[in-house]
């Protein structure tokens, strides 16, 4: 049995096209349970995701198994180690289309009646004579939408009846773009460019993904110097983004570099030898934390740049003509247990989705944002008011209160969650630490101890920050707050204490505020040798003179051999 997914649902990402009609406001789904009639909520989890479904069980099972299969196919060309990863399961909410439409009709009527005229000023309608009149907006609910928080992802999709080939579903380029570009540590630019260029026109068919031929621009018959034509950039130049040879050959350097990035990725993937493909992935992973070098290339792939160059040049003609089909392994999918969802699961998953909707609505149409915020808290409080103290529910309640600016309630929920579980989602741990530090600041304000935390106070803030550090994804604000805490601590930190902040700088080298803070702490506490590379990183990557001047001031405090003579 199959079910139709509304156009646009590809189990991952849905781009939002502007409405064609005038005065139409596209909003995320707003489902009030007491107004919605339909089948019960069902729940499934496993393989790093959760599903909350108000569809029949057979439809739910087909969707869950398809989602799993697609990610298994994806892992053949983009292993999980190279993807943006989260400790919090990715969440999917599948809603029966008929029930969703009925509920939406009631809610639209309520919204149109409640939106003040003053909030419709940006929806003026003009006639041919240029006269304006205020027109009540028309609301429509987006049938498919993906939303992200700093440490979570959720997709909502309306599912309808009819014939549809689940085997033809795919993971959209927008979704893959997010997984690739947000991976920590950041993937090399050449891999990001080359992989996304290949994936954009990829086709999924059952257990197989097919990549299109690569695009390659025209090449001169001979080089400007009269020698053999430049087919590909020398790999040392390519990895360094040195386009001087391309310019000398009369080529469009950036275009050649992008094409070669796609060629290199395609060459790395085009093998039936899984060990060989894994060696390429290992090279990419190591290149994300250290500069590409021939030594690293040889260590991972077993050949030097010259031999790899010859192979790339020989591989190029076929890669521009032929598609590449990659098939997943033969391991059968697990049998996912699908059961009725508990009240806690419904409140937590649906409430977290509604919490993430608020930011989206605030940007698109703030006049109704309060309605979404109220609905999110109402959903989350449903299980809480029925005496549930599930720590993950409490964590989402805390985040919802943070988002709504209620620090007192937020800390209460987050402290209660931390008492019941040693592990919370990364953002919840971070917000708990931030609120604890804010409370300490308030208590110490105006006293001699202001800005000087005791060891015990420092420990109380660092505990949730170190818990967040152990989860995925790493959050740069976690490392920044650790640096803030050590800046205020009355106890001198050891080199090992500050190494954690240095870890953050390595993970987020483009976050120069964090890099500068780490360097300044090393300088402040006399660990000048450790400060040197951070200062050098800042000087090399500073985007403007003001930022460069701040790092130059730190460099001046270092001994000449460590950067003070810069």
Image: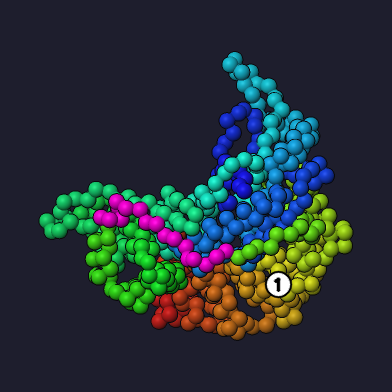
Q: Where does the C terminus fall, quadrant-wise?
A: bottom left
- Residue name at image x 37 percent, y 75 percent: 300
Quarter of the view holding residue 441: bottom right
Relative to 84, 316 lies left or right: left
User: Is 281 within the magenta?
Assistant: no
Frontmost residue, 49 versus 55:
55
Apparent side of residue 283 relative to residue 171 in the rendered image (left or right):
left
| Residue furthest top in the image | 129
Residue 319 belongs to magenta span: yes
Q: How many marks?
A: 1
Q: Going 59% across and 33% down the picture, which residue do you hit?
A: 19
Relative depth, front residue between 468 and 539: 468
Q: Position of residue 168 (x, y in %)?
A: 51, 49
Tell me where the magenta segment starts and ends, as one range. Answer: 317-333
Frontmost residue, 66 versus 485: 66
- Residue ranking furthest to the right: 386
What sort of colour scheme is used for the picture? rainbow
Image position, residue 463 (x, y; %)? 70, 76
The residue identified by callout 1 is: 423
- Residue 468 seen in the current view: yes
């Amino acid at each position: 049995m199959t079910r139709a997914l509304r156009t646009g649902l590809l189990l991952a990402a849905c781009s939002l096209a502007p409405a064609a009609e005038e005065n139409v406001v596209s909003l995320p789904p707003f489902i009030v349970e007491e107004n919605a009639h339909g089948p019960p909520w069902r729940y499934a989890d496993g393989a790093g995701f959760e599903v909350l479904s108000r569809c029949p069980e057979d439809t739910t099972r087909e969707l869950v198994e398809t989602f799993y299969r697609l990610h298994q196919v994806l892992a053949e060309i983009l292993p999980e180690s190279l993807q943006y990863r989260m400790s919090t399961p990715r969440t999917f909410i599948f809603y029966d289309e008929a029930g969703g439409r009925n509920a939406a009709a009631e809610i639209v009527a309520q919204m149109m009646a409640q939106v003040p005229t003053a909030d419709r000023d940006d929806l003026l309608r003009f006639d041919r004579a240029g006269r304006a009149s205020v027109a009540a907006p028309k609301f429509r609910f987006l049938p498919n939408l993906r939303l992200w928080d700093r440490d979570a992802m959720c997709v909502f999709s309306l599912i309808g009846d009819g014939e549809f080939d689940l085997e033809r579903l795919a993971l959209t380029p927008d979704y893959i773009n997010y997984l690739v570009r947000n991976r920590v540590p950041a993937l090399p630019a050449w891999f990001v460019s080359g992989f996304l260029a290949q994936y954009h026109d990829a086709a999924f068919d059952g257990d197989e993904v097919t990549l299109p031929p690569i695009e390659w621009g025209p090449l001169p018959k001979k080089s400007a110097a009269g020698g053999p034509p430049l087919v590909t950039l020398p790999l040392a130049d390519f990895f360094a983004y040195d386009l001087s040879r391309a310019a000398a050959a009369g080529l469009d350097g950036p275009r050649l570099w992008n094409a070669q990035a796609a060629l290199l990725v395609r060459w790395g993937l085009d093998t039936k030898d899984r060990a060989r493909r894994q060696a390429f992935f290992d090279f990419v992973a190591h290149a994300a934390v250290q500069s590409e070098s021939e030594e690293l290339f040889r260590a991972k792939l077993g050949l030097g740049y010259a031999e790899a160059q010859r192979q790339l040049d020989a591989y190029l003609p076929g890669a521009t003509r032929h598609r590449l089909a990659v098939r997943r392994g033969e391991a059968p999918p697990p049998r996912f247990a699908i059961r009725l969802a508990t009240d806690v699961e419904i409140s937590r998953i649906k409430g977290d989705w509604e919490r993430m909707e608020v930011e989206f609505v605030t940007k698109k149409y703030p006049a109704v944002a309060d309605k979404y915020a109220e609905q999110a808290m109402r959903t989350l409080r449903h299980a809480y008011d029925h005496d549930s103290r599930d720590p993950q529910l409490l964590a989402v309640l805390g985040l919802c209160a943070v988002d709504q600016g209620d620090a007192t309630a937020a800390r209460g929920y987050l402290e209660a969650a931390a008492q019941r579980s040693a592990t919370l989602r990364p953002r919840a741990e971070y917000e708990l630490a931030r609120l604890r530090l804010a409370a300490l600041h308030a208590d110490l304000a105006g006293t001699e101890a202001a800005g000087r935390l005791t060891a015990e106070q420092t420990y109380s803030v660092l505990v949730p920050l170190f818990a967040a550090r152990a989860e995925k994804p790493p959050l740069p604000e976690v490392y920044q707050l650790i640096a803030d805490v050590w800046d205020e601590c009355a106890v001198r930190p050891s080199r090992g204490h500050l190494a954690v902040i240095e870890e953050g700088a390595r993970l987020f080298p483009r976050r120069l505020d964090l890099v500068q803070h780490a360097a300044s702490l090393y300088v402040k506490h006399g660990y000048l040798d450790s400060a040197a590379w951070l200062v050098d990183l800042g000087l090399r990557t500073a985007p403007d003179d003001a930022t460069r001047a701040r790092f130059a001031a730190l460099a001046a405090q270092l001994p000449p051999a460590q950067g003070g003579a810069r």
